[in-house]
Amino acid sequence: MVEPDPVGALILDEAGELGDVVLVVDDVDGALTAAALERGARVLAACDDIRDEEQLPAGTTTVDLTAAPGPAADPLSEVTTVLWRLPKAVSAVEDVTQVVAMRCASQVVVYGGGRDKHLVHAMNEALAASFAEVSASRGRQKSRVLRASRPTDPVRTWPHRESLPELGVEVVAYGNVFATTALDRGTRLLLRALREGRPARGRALDLGCGSGIVSTVLAGLGWDVAGCDTSAAAVESTRLTAAANGVTVEVTRADGMPAGLRELDLIACNPPFHRGTAKDSSAAFSMIADAGSALRPGGELWLVFNSHLPYLPVARREVGPTRVALRDPSYLVTCSTKL
Ligand SMILES: C[S@@+](CC[C@H](N)C(=O)[O-])C[C@H]1O[C@@H](n2cnc3c(N)ncnc32)[C@H](O)[C@@H]1O
């Protein structure tokens, strides 16, 4: 069994005796789920990131917090304890808090833990918007737990919907999505380059699609578009954004390239520089390598990244000849052609 790290251990200690049905949210290494199962609880696990889901003990029952509950009895309705590795974004805390407060049992108690350096006061406020009692534990090993109980009458405010007049696009996004409904500066530059690039012809992939802004713009330009992301919230947001703009995007939740996508004409990517709360470029490196193997000869990878990041030589090595298509003081957009 995986031993919990300091954050996981503090969450478990603060929770003490668990309820009969436990919801574990964003368990990064499977340790919280394993501990709850060992204590005899019935466990439901919700991981936004598919890579976290793959760490869960075999046979764990998973639930998707972004999907609206179906007509059958809601599996969350019996949950009385929530063990949660808090995400970095306050918007994500607010979004999940609303779901938990609305759908779990009225006596539910939430234990959300994180490293002190990642916790901000706005997270207490996000919890307090849906729970009458919110308190913080004492710190231990640079970690802390926020405890919330007594759900009030929560209002579901996520997903948000926003118009981006400069693109002529409506964006719909859940709270756990990169930039939520905003247009990231790098994404804006990538889209400018793509609109000025060659005419739309063929099959394109938005690799790491987030809210689906890039997918939707590409589909509007006439590309036949697929999108993929590790995040359940991103996948659902991309579907909603495409639908809000009347375009079709085939979206898959996957770590890197979805199976079966080959001989692509275009891949657009604004790669991640974080995984969860940690800075991490390894996903970006493997996404560039994946792109190299999924493009047809002559197909193009369009990347945007902060100019200090070492992606240009990787794109040359993994894909082929690479030119800088556009730049601003912070970002580069590169176009690599598969040989
Ligand atoms: C910088 S954001 C860009 C999002 C969107 N394309 C945009 O420009 O607004 C990077 C996205 O990549 C996703 N991601 C991270 N690692 C990934 C991986 N291994 N495979 C697929 N997507 C990944 C993240 O969840 C995130 O949505």
Image: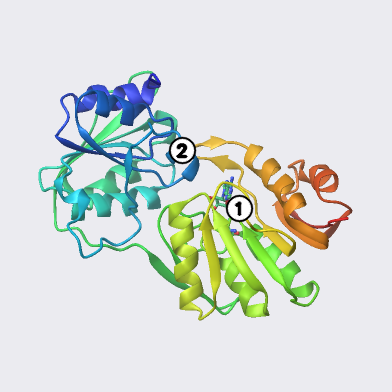
In the displayed structure, 137 sits above or below 300; it is above
Residue wearing tag 1: 259
Whether residue 107 is visible to the viewer of this picture, yes or no, is yes
Q: Amino acid at mark 2?
A: Glu
Q: Secondary structure at mark 2?
A: loop
The count of marks equals 2
Residue at 81 percent of width and 74 percent of height:
198
Residue wearing tag 2: 54
Residue at 80 percent of width and 43 percent of height:
314
Q: Is mark 1 within 8 Å of ligand 1?
A: no
Residue at 60 percent of width and 68 percent of height:
215
Where is residue 289, by image quadrant? top right
Q: Nearer the viewer, residue 289 or 111?
A: 289
Q: Residues within 10 Å of mark 2 (few under 14, many from 20)?
A: few
Residue 164 horizontal/vertical position (percent):
53, 74
Is residue 58 left or right of 282 when viewed as pictured?
A: left
Image quadrant holding the C terminus, namely bottom right
Mark 2 vs mark 1: give the one in front: 1
Is residue 70 left or right of 325 when viewed as pictured?
A: left
Residue 76 horizontal/vertical position (percent):
21, 49
In the displayed structure, 133 sits above or below 235; it is above
Residue at 89 percent of width and 53 percent of height:
321
Circles 2 and 1 in contact, beta carbons < 8 Å: no
Q: Nearer the viewer, residue 139 or 293?
A: 293
Q: Residues within 10 Å of mark 1 (few under 14, many from 20)?
A: few
Q: Nearer the viewer, residue 115 or 20?
A: 20
Residue 305 horizontal/vertical position (percent):
70, 51
In the displayed structure, 266 sits above or below 118; it is below
- Picture disc at residue 126: none
Residue 295 horizontal/vertical position (percent):
76, 58
Q: Is mark 2 within 8 Å of ligand 1?
A: no
Mark 2 or 1, nearer chain start: 2
